[in-house]
Amino acid sequence: MAQKKVLPASITIFGAKGDLTWRKLIPALYNLYIDHHLSQTFHIFCVDFLAVDDAAYRDWLLTGVNEFSRTGRADAQKWTEFARHITYVQGDFMKKDTYDALKKNVQKFEKDENIRGVRMFYFAVAPRFIEVIADALCIQKLCNRDNLDRIVVEKPFGTDLDSARKLNRYLAKRFKEKQIYHIDHYLGKEMVQNILAFRFANHVFEPLWNNEYIDHIQISVAEEVSVGKRGGYYDSSGALRDMIQNHLLQLLCIVAMDCPKAYEAEAIRDAKIKVLKSVRIYNTEQVFKNVVRGQYAAGVVNGQARKAYREEEQVKPDSNTETFVAARFLIESPRWKGVPFFLRTGKNMERQSTTIMIQFKETPHKIFKDDITPNKLIISIQPELEIGLLFEGKVPGLHMKLLPMEMDFMYKDAYIESLPEAYEALLLDVLDGEATQFMRADQIEWAWKVVMPMLDAWKKNPKKQLQFYESGTWGPASANALLKPFAKEWFHLAHKPATTLPEPAAKAQQVAAT
């Protein structure tokens, strides 16, 4: 990771006993610390309602680091040093006393260090607490310096367009736009960030990035996991809200955007919002022609039996909530007119993968007898990080016989460093005041505008065209039919066993051995 020097900081996490803090936030902050990306002067205040002393809380956090950190089990000495910077603040988010105690702690830290640095407040909480916490921070004047103080808000940001607008207005009355960081961890993924470099730093691809050369684009996020213990949340959300409205539309924006005027936050955000404003908004009839929704039935995933969605905990036995969505989006712009963007996501699918496939048009040169496979550019975000270009080549021999071949770039082969997790990159950006990888309020609202006709159509017709698919498959057959006449089925990257980037020391040994 490129070295960034951030200011001294007090970092507050609301929802300190939650899964996000345990699995993602503290492991990310610990890795930033051991990699020397944090200022030497920082403190982490962890706020939640459960009564627990600092020592027990730190021990619990350590189990999360040991299990989920990309660097493996924590070094005992480094963890002890890092843990000294953590204070647990017990309190109810609904009560003023909690914020009095927090303010006292933050001010004491700044007084002892004789410095007023960055204040970051991370809302790792249920959506119902966002307004309460924001209001308290405003009243207590804990987040009142435009250039130093920031709040980080997790998705879901609203449950529909109206609630998102209401929340945006509520926060805008209390904070400047540049203080509000709407986080989407997909934007922190290394390969997602690399798409901009791939497109705009390499002239060989950008002239082809339009409707003259591209036939269609598929963006697919397939998940092996079920809803698990999230049934209570998921049954009121569904795949469209949970994945399409944020993650997949963000990927669409990055793939479809015009080159921004500069690599600067507002220029990139402007380019993304331009894409969303160009997406065709469907009426109810068009929704049912261009969107497939499905729900998983019982089946087997990776040799494990999975029950049907309607049998999951806290899910209504007659639920019509979708766990799968495949949709055709059309962008009404000169660059993309006539090129469909196919977006797909689902749970309990055959294999975990996130891919972007750009299929180019067939060659106009028909001089060969063999069938020619159209060129494909494949960007794999997970489980492998790779970019591949599928092209035709001659098979060695005495005759002109063609065969599709792949030119492949893989992170694990090119880089010896262990890559930072998405939350590491995004947390560091917040501390640094870098908003490029974060959504702006208007972008959130436009994303809701795109999906609202789908939500409204399903609300009015809750059972219409709801398809069921067996767990462990790639979803309903109707999802393949959606692709016609552009493709017969969704693109699936050839299965490769999941790998991790080798540690520098291990890589060095490999090099030495050769």
Image (cartoon, helix red, strand yellow):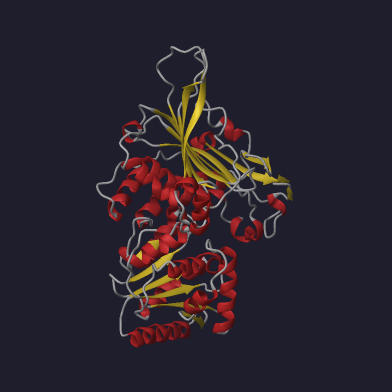
The residue that appears at 37% across and 27% down in the rendered structure is 213
Compared with 79, 270 (above or below) is above
Residue at the location (44% across, 22% down)? 362
Residue 167 on image: x %, y %: 41, 63
Query: Residue 29: x and y, percent?
Result: 46, 69
- Picture residue at 51% right of the left edge, 79% below the top: 80
x then y, percent, for residue 461: 58, 43
Q: Quadrant of residue 38?
A: bottom left
Quadrant that contains the N terminus: bottom left
In the depicted view, which residue is nearer to us: 280 or 143?
Answer: 143
Does residue 270 appear in the picture of this structure? yes
Q: Is residue 409 above or below residue 20?
A: above
The answer to which image quadrant residue 110 occupies is bottom left
**As drawn, 106 above or below 149:** below
Which percent across, then down, holds residue 55? 56, 83
Q: Is residue 301 above or below residue 94?
A: above
Q: Between residue 512 and residue 396, name the one nearer to us.
A: 512
Q: Is residue 138 left or right of residue 44?
A: left
From where the camera sits, is residue 125 visible? Answer: no
